[in-house]
Image (cartoon, rainbow, N blue to C red):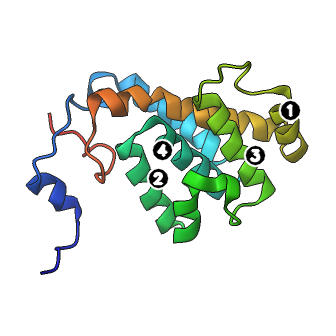
C-alpha cells in the first residue's frame, strides 16, 4: 500500500490550524518593515544561496517547522541540491559548502545557540567572517539573522500553517 503524496491541501485535510490570525492584518506596519528589511537582505551583496542556507539552519536550530518547510521549498525552487539542503543541519563535516557559506552557518549558530563559556560571537569567529565578508556583507548577514529572529515568536506561538504562502498561512 503506497502513501499518497503530500500536497498543500493535505494540511487542510489534516486539520492543521494556526493559533492566531494573520499578524499583518492586525499590524500592517509590520509587513512594510519586514518587506524593507527583506529587500535589503535579498538584494544585498551576499549570495541568496548563502542567505537561504543560513536561514534554513536558523529554522532548524529554533525548531520552526513553518520556516524550515518554507526555506527548503525556496531553496529547491532556486535549484539548490538535496545534498546541500539536507547537510545544512550537519554542515560542520559536510563537504558541500564554501568557506563563506561555512562562516555564515557558523555565525547563525553562534547567534542562536547559548554559549555558557563566553560570547556567542567570539572575536575569532568575527575575524573569520571579516576575512571573507566586507562590512556591507556582514551587515547583510546580521540583518538576515535579525529579520528571521523577528518572526521566530510569530512562527512558534502563532503557528502559521507550513507549506502555505504568506498571506494564506493562517486559518483563524
Expressed as whole percent of the image width and height from the top left, the position of residue 66 reads: 35, 44
Please name the residue that numbered disc 4 is placed on: 60
Quadrant, the C terminus? top left
Distance from Cα at disc 1 to Cα at disc 4: 24 Å
What crowding class fits label 3: few (fewer than 14 Cα within 10 Å), some (14-19), or many (20 or more)? many
Mark 3 / mark 4, whichever is N-terminal: 4
Q: What distance separates the C-alpha of mark 3 from that of mark 4?
A: 17 Å
Q: In the picture provided, is 172 more to the left or to the right than 146?
A: left
Looking at the picture, tell me which residue is in the foreground, 127 or 115. 115
Which quarter of the rendering shows the N terminus? Answer: bottom left
Q: CB of mark 1 within 8 Å of CB of mark 4? A: no
How far apart marks 1 and 3 lie (CA) works out to 11 Å
- Give the residue drawn at x 73%, y 18%: 118
**The image quarter in which residue 144 lies:** top right
In the displayed structure image, the side of residue 132 where residue 142 appears, left or right: left
Give the residue number, with chain letter if any, for mark 3.
103
Amino acid at each position: 500500500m503506497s502513501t499518497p503524496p503530500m500536497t498543500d491541501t493535505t494540511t487542510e485535510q489534516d486539520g492543521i490550524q494556526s493559533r492566531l490570525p494573520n499578524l499583518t492584518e492586525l499590524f500592517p506596519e509590520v509587513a512594510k518593515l519586514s518587506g524593507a528589511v527583506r529587500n535589503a537582505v535579498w538584494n544585498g551583496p551576499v549570495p541568496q544561496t548563502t542567505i537561504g542556507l543560513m536561514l534554513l539552519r536558523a529554522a532548524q536550530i529554533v525548531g520552526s517547522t513553518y520556516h524550515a518547510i518554507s526555506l527548503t521549498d525556496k531553496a529547491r525552487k532556486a535549484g539548490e541540491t538535496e545534498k546541500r539542503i539536507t547537510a545544512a543541519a550537519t554542515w560542520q563535516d559536510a563537504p558541500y559548502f564554501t568557506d563563506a557559506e561555512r562562516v555564515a552557518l557558523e555565525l547563525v549558530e553562534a547567534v542562536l545557540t547559548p554559549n555558557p563559556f563566553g560570547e556567542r560571537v567570539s572575536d575569532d569567529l568575527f575575524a573569520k567572517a571579516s576575512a571573507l565578508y566586507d562590512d556591507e556583507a556582514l551587515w547583510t548577514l546580521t540583518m538576515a539573522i535579525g529579520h528571521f529572529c523577528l518572526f521566530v515568536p510569530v512562527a512558534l506561538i502563532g503557528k502559521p500553517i507550513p507549506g502555505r504562502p504568506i498571506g494564506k498561512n493562517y486559518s483563524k
